[in-house]
Amino acid sequence: MKRVFDILTVLLAACVMAFTGCSPDELSTEQYADKGVALNVYGPQPVVRGGQLRFLGSNLDQITAVILPGVDPITEIEVVQAGVPSEIRITVPKEGPEPGFVTLVTADGQEITTKTELEFLETVVIESIEPLSVKPGDVITIKGEYLDLMHEVIFTDDVHVNEDRFEEPHSRYEIKVKVPVEARTGKVSLSDLGMNSEDPENPMINYATSEEELIVAGPKVTEPVTGNVQAGQELTITGSNFMYVDHVEIPGAEISEFEINEEGTILTFTLPQQLQLGEIILVAKSGEEIPAGTIQVKVPTELSVSPSPVKAGQTLTISGKDMDMVTGVSLPASGNVESPSITSESVSFAVPAEAQEGNITLNLNNGVSITVSYTLVKPVVTSYNAESVAVGEDLVIRGTDLDLVTGVTFGGDVTVDVTASQESIKVTVPSGAVTGALALNLANGTSVSGPELEVEPEPVDENVFWTWTGSFNSDNWANDLNPVPDGFDWSAVDLSENDVELVLQLTDVVADAQIVLQIPAGSWPQVAGSSEVNPAAGQTEAKIEFNQTMLDDIMANGGFRIKGKNFSVTKAELRKVVSEGDPNVAFEGTQPLEWNDGFKISPGLWSGNMPDSGVTLHVEFTASPDSDTPQLQIAGSDWTQLSSVTDGPDGYVNITEPDLTEKSYLLNDGDIAKVKSGGLIFKGQHLTITKVYWTEE
């Protein structure tokens, strides 16, 4: 047996330079040319006949031949890397090569010759390894030629033994070394550790490798594991050389505690709780992995669920085989079930109101989890007590399983909490509700849809800019409320004509309550110009007067938030302040009249204490000074003139007196009823209304 060097080298920072012959310390960090073919370094130097010689540089993939003294040009060239940088390798012939300069020939015939001569080491030969079949700890003898040049033995896989661990000092012809426990079957290599390099501090290392493999005994399995197992069960594996096992890997766990008999033929261990089905692997101390069988984890089978669907609060039973393996039950959303009833044939428990349908998880005593699906009973709406309802009216929802409902969401995304019976729900239609399908909200966080419900529009109060209704708890500064509708135009709030206030309907007010308005930006500063409000315990309403500084800050920062502590809000409203000194005023301002577009005063703007008779209506106005035909018409919501207005032809009043600024009419009972139920509509021309009010006779 004879094996010459198989050169394997490692690129280091310096080697023999191709042209300059400079030392490693003189190498440039920009040594690779971007264009053309260039040789920078080659090695190892010296090299052995039969070994590999490496060339590093730029575009060396264009080299077609390498010429060594004493032999024919070498054209079998291995391109390790092309381009910049690049590397090629050749095998040095065993016979014939002589020391001298090396020449590289490019594809276009150019020649590149090294400036240093290639030198050769004596040929290292591995003639034999005895014995070839060993166990870890056995001593092998490597015989050959020039072995004294080698200073390390390398076992498969990359297990290094330095010469200071050889069994006895090695000679030119022999090395004795103990086989490490980490070694595995494979070829054996010798290394000179770069000690023969011209630059020992930055060496290129020479290697010699055996032609035959060293057979290293390792763990072997003769009876692979099969079948169903459980956590806590003792498992036995039969084979040989188990004393070389480092650990056992099973799906879900790694086992380092196990027992081996004296002969190393039986390995036993206890299956852990993390057990999963899959392959068992013995990992040898050498790192080799030996399959030892496949385990199947025992689980309950033939599962069925009853009733299906099941109603929240009812008992659900899962039947099957080996159900006594179950140690716990978990449901979607509600989590673990408390104290399920478990027998060998079934698992039973009450379904929590918070549980959602989906997969039930059964946790087993072997650490495995399995699932079984189930469905829930859902409420169904069959009818409403009315086809159309108004805000503030009671709505009765009829159907089945409505006792599962905890809240109703109306069109307009307004939600009301409810207490329902199995067949009906009674709920007051909240402010902000609009026509749309109802959503019935369940305790588990899901909802079901009911038919569309028509909600009559709320009367428009022209003194109110916006209204929010709902349920908000300050929770000691943890929560914040944005009551402003999306898209609200703050420029509509004109403080030059009206005082404006934010009115909050409060609940749950206790001592030391605080209410502040904050800007939703940065570190949430308080709205400029605003003051903290401190309602007393039990207070049900708070008013915050708006000023121009507040309005400017809110407009600049996109709104505001309500924060604080020790209070809840059920309604927030931004509205004009109606003068308390003249409660019978329905309008005060400037409103030009047109025939084609009537100016309407809604009934909500009239004081609720207007009597049913004896009312005088007063209308103040200014006439256009350049017109001689100012006209006024006062109509009910049906667009017909009030019968009490009788001083004008064709259903309107001609304002002929140049200095006239007011008209008054004693309304009959029929007109009073019109005003209280539908409001008034004013039309005309060349006239601007400034005030509308009433007095009692």
Image: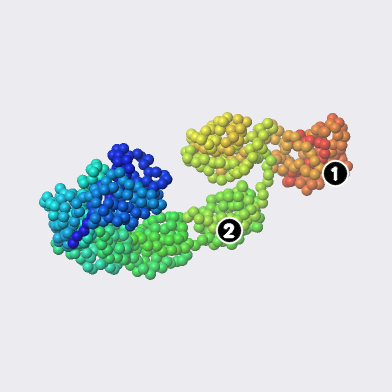
**Front residue of this view, candidates 629 and 197:** 197
The answer to whether the residue labelled 1 contacts the one labelled 2, judged by CB atoms less than 8 Å apart, is no
Quadrant housing residue 583: top right
What crowding class fits label 1: few (fewer than 14 Cα within 10 Å), some (14-19), or many (20 or more)? some
Task: Identify the residue under disc 2.
Answer: 450
Label 1's element? helix
**Front residue of this view, candidates 434 and 485:** 485
Measured from the top left, where is residue 309 in percent x and y? 47, 65
Q: Residue at x 56, y 50 (%)?
A: 415
Measured from the top left, where is residue 517 in percent x and y? 55, 35
Q: Residue at x 56, y 31 (%)?
A: 528
Residue 651: image tag: 1
Residue type, numbered disc 1? Gly
- The Cα–Cα distance between marks 1 and 2, rounded to whole angstroms, is 50 Å
Quadrant in the picture for the C terminus: top right
What crowding class fits label 2: few (fewer than 14 Cα within 10 Å), some (14-19), or many (20 or more)? many
| Marked residue nearer the N-terminal end (1 or 2) | 2
Residue type, numbered disc 2? Gly
Label 2's element? strand
Left or right side of 595 for 297: left
